[in-house]
Amino acid sequence: MVVRWQKQNDYLVVRIYRDLVGDWVVTQCWGNNQGSSSYTHTLVDSYSNALELLREIGREQRQRGFRRKQGREEQLGFDFS
């Protein structure tokens, strides 16, 4: 899952995914169009905990004046078995 927020030239992208060892990861990437950027990775116990963290992030972003942007996400069907 990928969710994007933007305010003028600033952005935040949050990704929720399961890594190759089965851990749930919430990655936050933020920056601006001048090339400044950073990121964090947070391990969570479950998908529902990841969604709760996403809701908290969304509340914070709305309070800061960011707006959620619709984006197209394509899931690639890799089979690692």
Image (cartoon, rainbow, N blue to C red):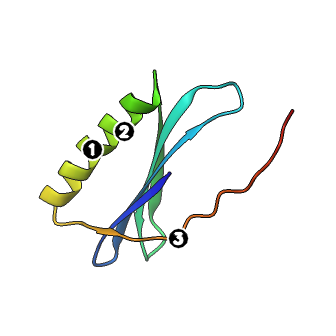
In the rendered image, which residue does mark 2 sit on? 51
Q: Distance between the Cα atoms at labels 2 and 1?
A: 6 Å
In the rendered image, which residue does mark 3 sit on? 72
- Which amino acid type is shown beneath numbered disc 1? Arg
Residue 23's disc is none
Question: Along the horizontal axis of the image, is 7 left or right of 13?
Answer: left
Q: Nearer the viewer, residue 36 or 25?
A: 25
- Which amino acid type is shown beneath numbered disc 3? Arg
- Which amino acid type is shown beneath numbered disc 2? Leu
User: Pointer 2: residues within 10 angstroms few (<14), some, or many (20+)?
Assistant: some
In the rendered image, which residue does mark 1 sit on? 55
Would you identify the image quadrant in which residue 42 lies? Answer: top left
Question: Along the horizontal axis of the image, is 24 left or right of 6?
Answer: right
Q: At which x and y percent is residue 41?
A: 49, 37
Tell me what residue is drawn at x 43 percent, y 76 percent. Answer: 33
Would you identify the image quadrant in which residue 45 lies? Answer: top left
